[in-house]
Amino acid sequence: MMDFLYPADPYTHRIAGVDEVGRGPLIGNVVTAAVILDPSRPIEGLNDSKKLSEKKREILSSVIKENALAWAIGEANPEEIDRYNILNATMLAMTRAVQALKVQPDYVLVDGNRVPKWDYNSSSVVKGDARVPEISAASIIAKVHRDHQMIELDRLYPQYGLARHKGYPTAEHLAAIRRYGVNELYRKSYKPVALIIEEMKGR
């Protein structure tokens, strides 16, 4: 993470990191998180959430929440994803996350190659979830939060196997949708779901 130069001094400026999870799944919310770390309380082991085991993510998520100056979750639901498209819905969710912070940031660093249209001083950081601790922390919190949502949805809809594939378009998941149908939590604008809806109309 040492190859990244901060746009401001984290000891004198509150820097928020923002990341998202859940753009690819066919069901549920896209989830974002914003985190302002406390420079005086560094957290060991921060990294891109995808590079960490589930157990490590769970532990770090708790540590981040206990030690950060502020953290918040922002989401956009399937209806918003279908209405605005996934990119715009993700930008909306990121805005909600930053606005929900109990401590407002002086600067915002967003994972990826674009930032929402907002009034915050900000910049995007490609592969920021592996380069910037604040973004790594956000990626971990967002991932754990959404995985928990999928486990809860699995209890409501066990026939889809959501706890296993977390809503991604696996062969198992697509077969389950064809068998059990498309419920209100699916992203109907996504091509695999739209195709299955059309298939079911033709039956």
Image (cartoon, rainbow, N blue to C red):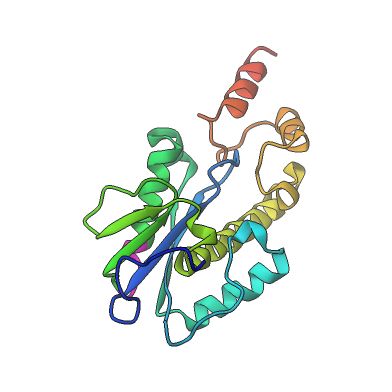
Q: Is residue 108 above or below residue 202?
A: below
Q: Residue 121 occupies which quadrant of the picture?
A: bottom left
Residue 84: percent from the left, percent from the top? 38, 36
Q: Residue 13, percent across and down?
A: 28, 76
Residue extending farthest left: 119
As drawn, the residue found furthest toward the front would be 3
Q: Is residue 130 left or right of residue 165?
A: left
Question: Residue 35, image x and y in percent?
Answer: 43, 69
Residue 129 or residue 198, whichever sits in front: 129
Residue farthest along the bottom direction in this orientation = 40
- Asked if residue 154 lies left or right of residue 131, the reply is right
**In the rendered image of this protein, does residue 113 appear above or below residue 7?**
above
Give the overall secondary structure of the magenta segment.
loop
Q: Could you tell me which residue is drawn at 33 percent across and 74 percent down?
A: 102
Identify the residue at horizontal 55%, vertical 60% (top origin): 130
Q: Please name whichever residue, 90 or 120, is drawn nearer the observer in this view of the structure.
A: 120
Please report the bounds of the magenta region as a residue range.
98-103
Residue sitting at 65 percent across and 52 percent down? 153
Q: Is residue 119 magenta?
A: no
Location of the C terminus by quadrant is: top right
Mark count: 0
Query: Which residue sits at x=66%, y=41%?
Result: 168
Instruction: Look at the picture and state if 100 lies above or below 40.
Output: above
Task: Give the percent coordinates (x, y) of residue 157.
Answer: 70, 47
Name the side, left or right, on which 95 lies relative to 180: left
